[in-house]
Image: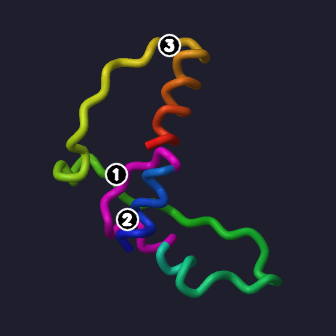
Amino acid sequence: MNAARVELAAQGLWCETSAAAGLAGLRAHGPREDDGPVVCVVTSGGYKDVATGTETYAPTAAHWAAIEASLKEAQGR
């Protein structure tokens, strides 16, 4: 489940490990091709998991250029 939590975090969704169980199950067993769309519900935010959020970040200016630059920088890590 930790890999699923990390995958969600890379997409900007901070959740506790148990909340990533749906995605972990999907990655482990996958949908059949004839099943159609799949929705995985993240049931709990990561705010209770204070050990995960150890980094601090400066506020980002509220305009697209600054947000885009911040996202590109985060992808490079």
Q: Amino acid at mark 2?
A: Ala
Mark 2 vs mark 1: which is more N-terminal? 2
| 9 lies above or below 65 | below
Q: Disc 1 marks which amino acid?
A: Gly
Decide if residue 11 is on the left or right side of residue 58.
Answer: right
Q: Secondary structure at mark 3?
A: loop
Q: Could you tell me residue 56's position as x and y percent?
A: 25, 31
Mark 3 to mark 1 CA distance (whole Å)? 24 Å
Mark number displayed over residue 68: none
Mark 3 / mark 1, whichever is N-terminal: 1
Of marks 3 and 1, the one in the foreground:
3
Residue 34 magenta-highlighted: no
Residue displayed at 56% across by 78% down: 26
Give the residue number, with chain letter if any, for mark 1. Answer: 45
Say left or right for 46 vs 28: left
Q: Work out which residue is located at the far left of the displayed protein and give it.
A: 51
- Name the residue that disc number 2 marks: 19
Based on the picture, tell me whether residue 19 belongs to the magenta stretch. yes
The residue identified by callout 3 is 62
Which image quadrant for residue 17? Answer: bottom left
Q: Quadrant of residue 42?
A: bottom left
Front residue (pair 33, 74):
74
* Residue 74 locus on image (x, y percent): 46, 37
Are dots 2 and 1 in contact, CB under 8 Å? yes
Q: Local crowd at mark 3 within 10 Å, few (<14), some, or many (≥20)?
A: few
The span shown in magenta is 11-23
Tell me the residue at 74%/69% (across/down). Answer: 37
Tag 2 near tag 3, CB within 8 Å = no
